Image: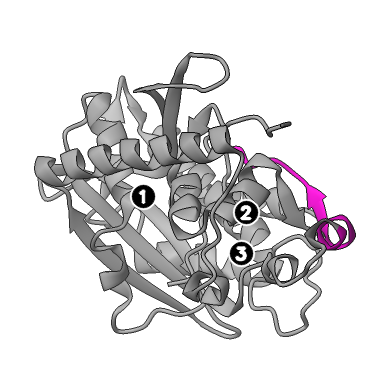
Amino acid sequence: MIRPPFPKLIDSTLRGTFVSCPRKFELEYLRHWKPTSQSIHLVAGGAFAKGMEVTRETFYGERQPTNIAIGAGIRALILEYGEFDPEDEKATKTLDNMCGALVAYFDHYGLDTDPIQPHFVHGKPAVEFSFALPLPLSHPETGDPILYGGRFDMVGEYNGSLFAVDEKTTSQLGATWHKNWTLRSQLTGYCWGAREFDYPVAGAIIRGVSILKNSYGHGESIQYRPQWMIDRWYHQLLRDIERMISCWSEGYWDYSLDSACANYGGCSFLDVCNSNDPERWLAADFIQREWHPVQPRIAKETQA
């Protein structure tokens, strides 16, 4: 039996996909099948994240004025967005709108007045924090420790405590948006990673940026993560990865065949799983492109 390589590093996206549907995990992250059309959410989200990073580094790290810092961020956003042209005429995450969203963000949260300020390490702001840490699980092919990794936008100081700070672009912010993060594994993993590097974060602060056709919205969710929650998350993470290894060893990946197939407008592999000849659908409508969890400028789009 020929098996695809098992990931050397697991992040919240891989773990969450596996928990919702192991078959999708295999197709998307082991065999690396992706839809041929590039997602505007990934392009726009990555460009926005790059603009945020450069703006903060220019203002807090280089001590440049606000207008210079935001200008540098916009230039970085434009370069990152590149020549991508949204196919949908109704798309809201156009280049112009993403630039507007960056300006609107810092109008709403002033760089010098924001209650969340970056934590400084050796005189530099802790902007764009990434980590990749070994787990007590052996890789089924190499025998090396499997890594768990992630990245978030900033280690921030808020009300005398440290927090993992992350921005998420979204289509809308509803009244219950903040509740979507209450038990979110991604945030708990951020806190675990930060604490492993001796940053005693109290939790995570998520800021949502909604990008509509002619306006922008802002939301904030402060999520605390006591040690017992991190310990429970860690125990569950190890169990989930052990199940990944079991599926890989057996060569069979379970199907959800339930609500996960229709979430967020439908799984991208819906037609594949609905066919008696899935390989034909994959060859016709997908390309192979790898996911790199801790590389710079990973887009962060929430469907919540």
SS class, disc 2: helix
Q: In the image, what residue occupies the spot 57% across and 32% down?
A: 7
Measured Cα–Cα span from mark 2 to mark 1: 21 Å
Reply above or below: 31 against 142. below
Q: Which residue is mark 3?
A: 99
Between disc 2 and disc 3, the foreground one is 2
Q: Which residues, given as a range, are shown in magenta? A: 280-292
Q: Earlier in the sequence, mark 2 or mark 1?
A: 2
Name the residue carrying label 1. 186
Structural distance between the alpha carbons of marks 2 and 3: 9 Å
Q: Residue furthest top?
A: 143
Q: Which residue is mark 2?
A: 47
Q: Earlier in the sequence, mark 2 or mark 3?
A: 2
Q: Quadrant of the N terminus?
A: top right
Magenta region includes residue 24: no
Q: Is residue 301 above or below residue 18?
A: below
